[in-house]
């Protein structure tokens, strides 16, 4: 997965596409998360959740803690994956659903992928296809 992610990052960069992550937490918390995860993307904060609301992302106990999410985390634990501990004194909402969106430099929405469960993400191939189609 790491190799595919690096290939995706290189492809996006070659096409002039910048990946930006949006957090509803504080700037301090976002900066700490970037350091601890080694994330190299730009991270912006949206504490008012305007972005989340605009794209219709909601809070859901059943989707965050449903069987698909539990299955994903059980597999990660079985593989020895270490998870970040919650940050003390930082706002966090583990029930907030996220998503992946591609927006071009003119603000046109190219891809909208709201999560179906907490660990749900579009395939790297679907992102590559979307970017390639948009830049042709």
Image (cartoon, rainbow, N blue to C red):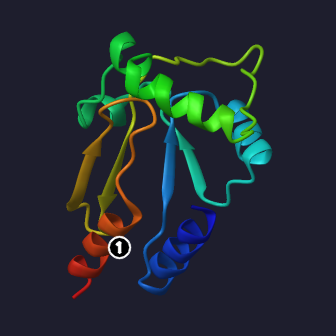
Asked whether 3 or 96 is in front, the reply is: 3
Disc 1 designates what residue? Answer: 128
Position of residue 21 in the picture relative to residue 125 (left or right): right
Q: Quadrant of residue 61?
A: top left
Residue 118 placed where, x, y %?
Answer: 43, 30
Asked whether 99 or 117 is in front, the reply is: 117
Asked whether 50 or 65 is in front, the reply is: 65
Kindly identify the residue that appears in the image at 75 percent across and 13 percent down: 89
Q: Quadrant of residue 115?
A: top left
For the C terminus, give its image quadrant.
bottom left
Q: Quadrant of residue 97?
A: top left
Kindly identify the residue that appears in the image at 22 percent across and 77 percent down: 134
- Is residue 30 shown above or below 110? above
The number of callouts visible is: 1
Position of residue 124 in the picture relative to residue 31 (left or right): left
Residue 114 placed where, x, y %?
Answer: 28, 39
- Is residue 9 shown above or below 67? below
Asked whether 14 or 83 is in front, the reply is: 83
Q: Residues within 10 Å of mark 1 (few under 14, many from 20)?
A: some
Residue extending farthest to the front is 78
- Is residue 3 shown above or below 69? below
Position of residue 60 in the picture relative to residue 90 (left or right): left
Residue 9 placed where, x, y %?
Answer: 54, 72
Kindly identify the residue that appears in the image at 44 percent across and 16 percent down: 65
């Amino acid at each position: 997965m790491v190799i595919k992610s690096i290939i995706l990052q290189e492809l996006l960069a070659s096409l002039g596409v910048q990946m930006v992550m949006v957090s509803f937490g504080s700037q301090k918390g976002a900066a700490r998360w970037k350091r601890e995860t080694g994330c190299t993307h730009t991270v912006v904060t949206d504490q008012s959740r305007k972005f989340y609301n605009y794209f219709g992302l909601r809070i859901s106990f059943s989707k965050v803690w449903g069987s698909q999410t539990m299955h994903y985390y059980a597999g990660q634990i079985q593989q020895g994956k270490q998870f970040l501990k919650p940050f003390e004194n930082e706002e966090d909402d583990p029930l907030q659903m996220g998503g992946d969106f591609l927006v071009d430099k003119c603000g046109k929405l190219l891809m909208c992928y709201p999560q179906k469960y907490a660990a749900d993400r579009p395939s790297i191939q679907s992102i590559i296809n979307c970017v390639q189609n948009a830049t042709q």
